[in-house]
């Protein structure tokens, strides 16, 4: 479909005896911000590298920007901006020198104008002569994004781009992401932050190489069919182990000064919590399951193939 920027099915990747990505099927619409979530080691980075042409899938089929992911990786690279987890530009070059070097690698005409435009759009003009190695995490993030955008890609693949930056830098970064999306650029972004996941138009959750859920945030939560209660009161955290052993309590998680208890059997869990409240006097209030509740549930359902 021409409306899909990414359309892959049955994508697999192995490294030796490790099956890192298992039958990945993914569709991302043009102009969409698509969140890619999962624990460390789940296969997110490997999947992103296959989509942008840096790794060849062992099997499967599909397209990225209308180009075959198996046969046209070189052409895909020229139309994709890929921002890696770790800052990968040159510490001993200035901001402007880094961008000029990237422009040279892409063989861009009008490099000076393109670099100046990127500096202006990302608010980097006043720091153009600053060495990249002296930048804070937030400014390195801006520089890396500017480098990704230099060749005017149609698709951005951002691998945990806000890891290690302060809340204001994260917020500013996401404002820029939504501006780019509004301009028609498709964005696939991996993240561990639930507030960032909720900023995406749609999500995919991957664990141990397998896709477990996909849809909008509300669809992912609804698909888990969880019922959640919030437990509050003094010294409630010593109740966590007791709660985990109660009928209907599939998961117990700390949320600040409260506990979230969730399960799929509403009646059993409600009866258990009623008994707990009568015995201990804690507050028990039904709440809407959060995206984090859903992901804890999904993680519990996933089976680690390397677990003993």
Image (spheres, rainbow, N blue to C red):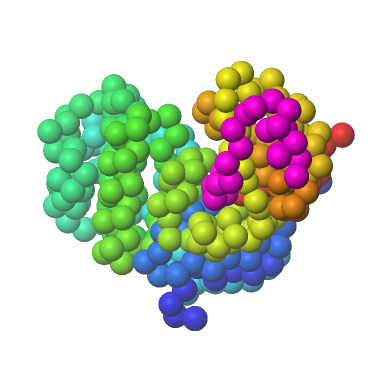
| Horizontal and vertical percent position of residue 168 | 29, 34
Q: Quadrant of residue 11?
A: bottom right
* Residue at figure coordinates x 65%, y 51% from the top left: 227
Front-most of residues 174 and 52:
174
* Residue at figure coordinates x 21%, y 58% from the top left: 109
Q: Is residue 287 magenta?
A: yes
Q: Is residue 164 left or right of residue 182?
A: right
Whether 114 is drawn above or below 191: the answer is below
Whether 148 is drawn above or below 283: the answer is below
Whether 65 is drawn above or below 237: the answer is below
Q: Is residue 143 left or right of residue 224?
A: left
| Horizontal and vertical percent position of residue 105 | 34, 49
Q: Residue furthest bottom?
A: 1
Quadrant occupied by the C terminus: top right
* Residue at figure coordinates x 28%, y 63% from the top left: 182
Whether 251 is drawn above or below 29: the answer is above
Counting the numbered discs, the total is 0
Does the image show residue 14?
Answer: no
Front-most of residues 161 and 64:
161
Q: Residue furthest right?
A: 308
| Horizontal and vertical percent position of residue 264 | 72, 53
**Magenta region, residue range:** 271-292
* Residue at figure coordinates x 58%, y 65% from the top left: 26
Q: Quadrant of residue 69?
A: bottom right
Front-most of residues 203 and 159:
203
Q: Residue furthest front?
A: 278
Q: Is residue 21 left or right of residue 181?
A: right
Q: Is residue 31 magenta?
A: no
Does the image show residue 247?
Answer: yes
């Amino acid at each position: 479909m021409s409306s899909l920027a990414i359309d892959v099915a049955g994508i697999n990747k192995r490294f030796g005896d490790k099956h890192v990505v298992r039958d990945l099927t993914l569709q991302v619409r043009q102009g969409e911000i698509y969140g890619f979530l999962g624990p460390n080691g789940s296969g997110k980075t490997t999947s992103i590298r296959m989509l942008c042409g840096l790794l060849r899938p062992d099997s499967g089929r599909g397209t990225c920007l209308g180009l075959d992911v198996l046969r046209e990786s070189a052409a895909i690279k020229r139309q994709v901006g890929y921002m890696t987890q770790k800052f990968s530009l040159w510490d001993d070059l200035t901001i402007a020198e880094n961008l000029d070097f990237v422009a040279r690698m892409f063989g861009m005409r009008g490099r000076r104008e393109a670099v100046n435009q990127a500096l202006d759009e990302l608010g980097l003009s006043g720091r153009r002569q600053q060495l990249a190695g002296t930048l804070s995490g937030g400014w390195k993030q801006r520089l890396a994004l500017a480098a990704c955008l230099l060749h005017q890609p149609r698709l951005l693949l951002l691998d945990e781009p806000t890891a290690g930056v302060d809340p204001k830098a994260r917020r500013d970064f996401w404002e820029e992401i939504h501006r780019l999306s509004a301009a028609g650029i498709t964005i696939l972004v991996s993240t561990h932050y639930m507030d960032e996941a909720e900023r995406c138009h749609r999500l995919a959750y991957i664990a141990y190489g397998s896709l477990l859920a996909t849809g909008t945030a509300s669809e992912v939560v609804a698909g888990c069919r969880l019922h959640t209660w919030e437990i509050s009161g003094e010294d409630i955290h010593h109740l966590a182990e007791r709660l985990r052993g109660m009928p209907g309590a599939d998961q117990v998680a700390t949320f600040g000064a409260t506990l979230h208890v969730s399960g799929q059997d509403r009646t059993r869990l409600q009866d258990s919590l009623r008994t707990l409240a009568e015995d201990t006097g804690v507050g028990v209030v039904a709440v809407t399951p959060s995206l984090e509740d859903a992901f804890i549930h999904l993680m519990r359902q996933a089976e680690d193939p390397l677990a003993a």
